Amino acid sequence: MKFVDEATIRVEAGNGGNGCLSFRREKYIPRGGPDGGDGGDGGSIYLEADPNLNTLADFRYTRRFKAPRGEDGRGRQMTGKSGEDLVIRVPPGTVVSVADTGELMGDLTVEGQRLCVARGGHHGLGNIHFKSSTNRAPRRTTSGTPGEQRDLRLELRLLADVGLLGLPNAGKSTLLRAVSAARPKVADYPFTTLHPQLGVVRVGPEQSFVIADIPGLIEGASEGAGLGIRFLRHLARTRLLFHLVDVAPPDASQDPVAGVRAVAHELQEFSPRLAGLERWLVLNKVDLIEQGRQDEVCDAIVAALEWDGPVYRVSALAGVGLDALVNEAMARIFHLTREPPPAADSPAGDFDQPFTVDDDPWHES
């Protein structure tokens, strides 16, 4: 199944049933009076977070959802049957907004959480409600009200604690494979990661965190170059970013310092809020540097960047330095989890890059 993280659907709640115009007609009971019943309420439409789903792929094929209407009322004061509510299941992390106005409707992050996106119409009243001492044979009824209808924009943001950031081929997928059971594609060419990957890192008994890998960023990504910019929204909920750097690039003309600055610039251009997240510098592939020069090379990169945050030297392929990285990350996440989790404060937060599933050449139609 292809990874789909955006979809537009139309929801149409059921109309309310109409009230009934009826009079009691029984043998030996003349002028029985009004007995028209009420209509039923229309069915509402809900979205529900289902942990068994991890993409919005189902909405590529079914984009219109309609709840049943309420039945009309009947004589003998019989109320029409209400339409059943329609529940649409979506993956946790789905942000729901109105497609036309961009108004945020809700953010489904917890298993079983429900959000009403279209309220069913109210039932109409039968003529029995309008009898009075001066109007004993009312012919007045009311019609059911129409159900709500709207186009919705669904946007999936992965629920992860740590996000991996860096240039293509910085070793993000290799790191994810080394510390979790995830098996993303790894190869010696750029953009082997075409869509986000999740992995669970288990540090100890009842101690684990989720790490997210997105396609690498390149210079000009905020203007549409490469793949990573369209997936940066999946780092919105993370509490911590690992900025991976290839300290021994195969091409000598590639400067690790320039690469870090380029990625930081694209991050800032895309979302200042995301750029403000806590970021750790992870110097990867140190095993490719001669043992006696590792300190010199790594210290030079840190000094050139004037980096004042945490720095880790690792080799994802050889497993060097990974234990310290994940253990300290677990401790930091434990501290950060005491704060409320990041939530959507607008339809796309400040991730307002226009992009639809149909525009993505990497997704199969």
Image (cartoon, helix red, strand yellow):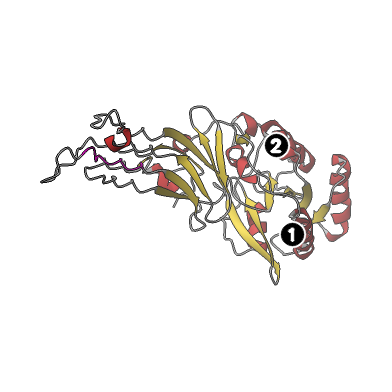
In depth, the one of 286 and 8 nearer the eye is 8
Amino acid carrying label 1: it is: Ser
Residue where numbered disc 2 is placed: 267
Give coordinates of residue 6: x percent, y percent.
Answer: 50, 40
Amino acid carrying label 2: it is: Leu
Q: Residues within 10 Å of mark 1 (few under 14, many from 20)?
A: many
In depth, the one of 117 and 227 nearer the eye is 117
35 inside magenta stretch:
yes
State the separation of the CA atoms marked 1 and 2: 25 Å
Give coordinates of residue 225: x percent, y percent.
Answer: 60, 33
How many numbered circles does the render carry? 2
In depth, the one of 359 and 111 nearer the eye is 111
Identify which residue is drawn at 77% across, 52% down. 282
In depth, the one of 8 and 84 nearer the eye is 84
Identify which residue is drawn at 23% across, 42% down. 74
Examine the rendered structure and indicate whether residue 246 appears above or below residue 275.
below
Q: Which quadrant holds the C terminus?
A: top left
Q: Residues within 10 Å of mark 2 (few under 14, many from 20)?
A: many
Q: Give the farthest residue toward the bottom.
A: 205
90 inside magenta stretch:
no
Picture quadrant where residue 38 is located: top left
The magenta segment is 33-42
Identify which residue is drawn at 24% across, 29% down. 139
Q: Main secondary structure of the magenta part?
A: loop
Query: Which label number is shown at residue 222?
Result: none
Name the N-terminal-most of marks 1 and 2: 2
Give coordinates of residue 91: x percent, y percent.
Answer: 51, 51
Q: Is residue 314 visible?
A: no
Residue where numbered disc 1 is placed: 315
Secondary element type, mark 2: helix
